[in-house]
C-alpha cells in the first residue's frame, strides 16, 4: 500500500517569546520541513510519503511549545481506497488532538439544471 499524505494548516496563538520562536524554527529545520512562522501564526503545507509519522511527531512538539492555538492542521490521506480519508489536528493545553474523518457519498442521482 502506497500512501500519500497532504498536510495543510494554519494556527494563530498568543505572541511567542523569541526563545520559543527560535525553538520552533530549529524543530522544523532539523526535520527538513519548511514552515511560515510568525510571532502569532504558523502556516504549514507538505505533501509526500511520510515515514514514522514524522509530521505528527513534529506537531506534537509544536503543541507542547504553543500550549493553545486557534485553527487546525488538516491531512488528506490518499491510499488504495476509493476515496481519500482525513485527519484533523488541533492544539489545546499543550496537546495535539486528532479527529479522523472520511467521505460519505449519497446515492447517485440525475442532476437537475
Image (cartoon, rainbow, N blue to C red):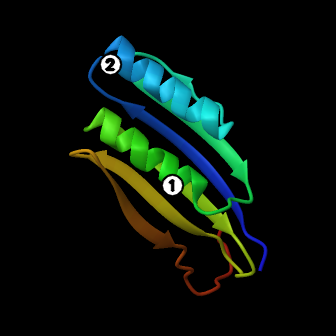
The CA distance from mark 2 to mark 1 is 21 Å
Between 18 and 69, the residue placed more toward the observer is 18
Task: Name the residue at 51% across, 54% down.
Answer: 56
Is 28 situated above or below 109? above
Residue 50 falls in which quadrant of the image? bottom right
Between 56 and 74, the residue placed more toward the observer is 56
Q: Which mark is drawn over residue 73?
A: none
Q: Which residue is mark 2?
A: 16
Under circle 1, the secondary element is helix
Task: Name the residue at 59% across, 54% down.
Answer: 54
Q: Which mark is drawn over residue 56?
A: 1
Q: Is residue 92 left or right of residue 73?
A: left
How far from the left and from the top, in percent, is residue 30? 62, 34
User: Of label 2 and label 1, which has the lower sequence position?
Assistant: 2
How far from the left and from the top, in percent, is residue 95? 29, 51
User: Hey, which residue is sitting farthest left in the picture?
Assistant: 93
How far from the left and from the top, in percent, is residue 19? 37, 17
Amino acid at each position: 500500500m502506497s500512501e500519500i499524505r497532504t498536510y495543510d494548516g494554519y494556527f494563530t496563538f498568543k505572541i511567542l517569546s523569541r526563545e520559543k520562536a527560535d525553538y520552533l524554527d530549529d524543530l522544523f529545520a532539523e526535520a527538513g520541513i519548511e514552515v511560515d512562522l510568525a510571532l502569532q501564526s504558523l502556516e504549514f503545507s507538505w505533501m509526500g510519503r511520510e515515514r514514522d509519522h514524522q509530521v505528527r511527531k513534529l506537531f506534537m512538539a509544536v503543541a507542547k511549545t504553543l500550549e493553545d492555538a486557534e485553527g487546525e492542521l488538516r491531512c488528506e490521506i490518499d491510499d488504495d481506497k476509493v476515496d481519500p480519508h482525513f485527519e484533523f489536528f488541533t492544539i489545546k493545553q499543550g496537546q495535539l488532538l486528532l479527529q479522523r474523518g472520511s467521505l460519505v457519498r449519497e446515492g447517485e442521482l440525475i442532476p437537475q439544471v
